[in-house]
């Protein structure tokens, strides 16, 4: 059985996921959520997203998608395109005996792998910042919400809602999560 491809994204109300190669907010609870979801698993990142991290994330097998043949970062594997990244991630998932491959962005990587994605862990950020990277529009006829978390009242908390496929650094300390979703496709529906 193939490992499930899971996109993990924090998305502002206006669809922004990044600005100037960084996050336009900092929400500690969401960073912890990202860490918990991705730890011990293959994690596919685009080159700009990887560069924004400033260092490889410990405890993950990172695959960086880049067209630059000279790019060779320590602590990460390289793929020349999304399909190659997925092949590498599948081999790693098998070797690690894990059933998920995580996609951490950016926008081009989310878009390129959306047809293969089986779950989206989506954090809604209660802001409308300016940005230059946007999460792909979702056809909600293709996804169903399977889980939702409502944040606590404190700033920096988040809500979670899982979405499933239905066949579905500037820091603003005032940022908070309005909702967390998990989305998945409807059962038995081909994608």
Image (cartoon, rainbow, N blue to C red):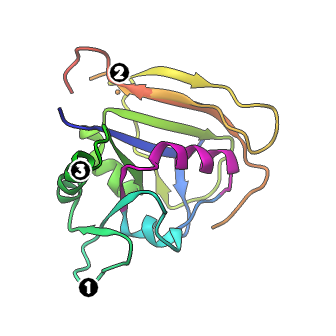
Q: Is residue 182 magenta?
A: no
Name the N-terminal-most of marks 3 and 2: 3
Viewer can see residue 10: no
Question: Looking at this view, is 140 or 98 the one in front?
Answer: 98
Q: Position of residue 100 (x, y in %)?
A: 33, 40
Whether residue 126 is visible, yes or no, is: yes
**Residue found 46% across the figure and 21% down from its top:** 145
Q: CA distance from mark 3 to mark 1?
A: 27 Å
Q: Look at mark 1 in the image and give the residue it sits on.
A: 70
**Residue at (57% x, 39% y) in the render:** 123
Task: Read off the magenta span.
Answer: 25-45
Mark 1: which secondary structure? Answer: loop
Say whether residue 170 is left or right of residue 81.
Answer: right
x 38%, y 78%: residue: 74
Task: Check disc 2 and report its element: helix, strand or loop.
Answer: loop
User: Which residue position is annotated with label 2?
Assistant: 141
Observer-nearest residue: 91 or 33? 91
Camera-nearest label, 3 or 1: 3
Query: Residue at the location (48% across, 28% down)?
Result: 162
Label 3 packing within 10 angstroms: few (<14), some (14-19), many (20+): few
Quadrant of the rendered image containing residue 137: top left
Q: CA distance from mark 3 to mark 2?
A: 35 Å
Distance of mark 1 from mark 2, alpha carbons? 42 Å
What residue occupies the far bottom of the structure in this picture?
70
Determine if the magenta segment contains residue 38. yes
Q: Secondary structure at mark 3?
A: helix
**Residue hosting label 3:** 95
Q: Which comes sooner in the sequence, label 3 or label 1?
A: 1
Q: Earlier along the polypeptide chain: callout 1 or callout 2?
A: 1
Q: How many marks?
A: 3
């Amino acid at each position: 059985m193939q490992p499930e491809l899971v996109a993990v994204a924090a998305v502002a109300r206006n669809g922004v996921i990044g600005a100037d190669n960084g996050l336009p907010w900092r929400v500690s609870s969401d960073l912890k959520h990202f860490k918990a979801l991705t730890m011990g698993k293959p994690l596919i990142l685009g080159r700009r997203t990887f560069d924004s991290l400033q260092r490889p994330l410990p405890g993950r097998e990172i695959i960086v998608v880049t067209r630059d043949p000279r790019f060779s970062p320590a602590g990460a594997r390289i793929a020349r395109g999304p399909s190659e990244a997925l092949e590498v991630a599948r081999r790693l998932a098998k070797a690690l005996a894990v059933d998920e491959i995580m996609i951490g962005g950016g926008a081009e990587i989310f878009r390129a792998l959306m047809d293969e994605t089986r779950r989206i862990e989506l954090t809604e950020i209660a802001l409308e910042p300016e940005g230059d990277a946007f999460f792909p529009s979702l056809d909600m006829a293709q996804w169903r919400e399977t889980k939702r978390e409502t944040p606590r009242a404190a700033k920096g908390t988040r809500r979670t809602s899982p979405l499933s496929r239905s066949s579905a650094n500037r820091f603003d300390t005032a940022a908070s999560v309005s909702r967390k979703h998990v989305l998945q496709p409807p059962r038995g529906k081909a994608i």
